[in-house]
Image (cartoon, rainbow, N blue to C red):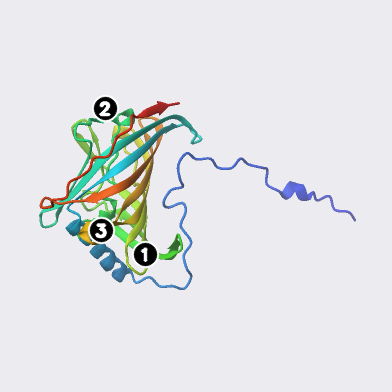
Amino acid sequence: MLSEFDPLAAVAPPTLPRTSWQPPGIDEVKPSIALGVACPFAHVMEQSAKRVQELVENLERFSAVEDLLHQTLDNYGIPIRTVTRKYNYVASFSEPEPGILNVDEDRDEKLTKGGYPDRIATNGFATLALVFHPHMSETFAMACEGLSDWRGHATWLVYFRQRDDRPNHMHAYKVGNQMYPIGLKGRAWITADTFQIVRIESEIVHPAPDIQLLSEHQIVEYAPVPFPKKQTTMWLPRTAQIYFNLRKHHYYRRHSFDHFMLFSVDTDEKRKEPILTPSREGS
């Protein structure tokens, strides 16, 4: 007896691939990890904290040339407007009181927010690694997810999330003269041998409708930067990407840093200003 079963009827109807203008969420996709490898969480946290403390202690002030690519995107992630900028970037770290960290970032001494694309300034890429500083880490819930790989190097994956019962001193948006603290959650890639942070991916825990911020996703990659005159090498952000939905617009930004210079108040090293090219706007 012939069956009337149609094998094609058991096949699910075709669907369009999922299209998104930003990367998958932190909790949606987890990188692959090595099976059967236990994570020495306490040791990872202790050593990575030391690396960040060394950064703050040794990096009084540094400058760099920053290239910015800013795009307004449609709902499918296609750029509908592109703007580029080049800045002289300066960041300085200080600890005026035990337990209090100050980080100041500046781009061109006379530049106002009107000089930023869509009047939006984005900062904090040099400080995102401070999540692992002892003064900051206590405000986050953290867990080691396992041993992974980043560009051929074994790395520990550490997940972090802003705690609701602790103050948020890490991330905020400034609108006018008012600050709006925004909690972060994310994942860090920490080298298994030297415990240097090589990559951090983060997003906001909750939308902030008061300022029309629905989403934000950052991807920051760090690399060793040698300073021969100081006989030291430091891990600093080389690229930072940010996707954010603000004021009913989708935005993408890519910050690239180069030509680093390290200096302090007692140095006799003079900073050579880079030549800035005119900004370009297009559609």
On the image, numbered disc 1 is attached to which residue?
191
Locate residue 17, reporting x and y percent: 59, 42
Q: Taking the image as drawn, is residue 58 in sight?
A: yes
Locate residue 97, reporting x and y percent: 9, 54
Task: Identify the secondary structure beneath mark 3.
Answer: helix
On the image, numbered disc 2 is attached to which residue?
114
Q: Residue at x 36, y 47 (%)?
A: 239
Locate residue 53, reporting x and y percent: 21, 61
The alpha-carbon separation of the residues under discs 3 and 2 comes to 37 Å
Locate residue 192, reporting x and y percent: 37, 68
Q: Residues within 10 Å of mark 2 (few under 14, many from 20)?
A: few
Q: Earlier in the sequence, mark 1 or mark 3?
A: 1
Q: Is residue 248 left or right of residue 225?
A: right
**In front here: 83 or 212?**
83
On the image, numbered disc 3 is attached to which residue?
228
**In front here: 173 or 277?**
277
Q: Are marks 3 and 2 in contact (CB under 8 Å)?
A: no
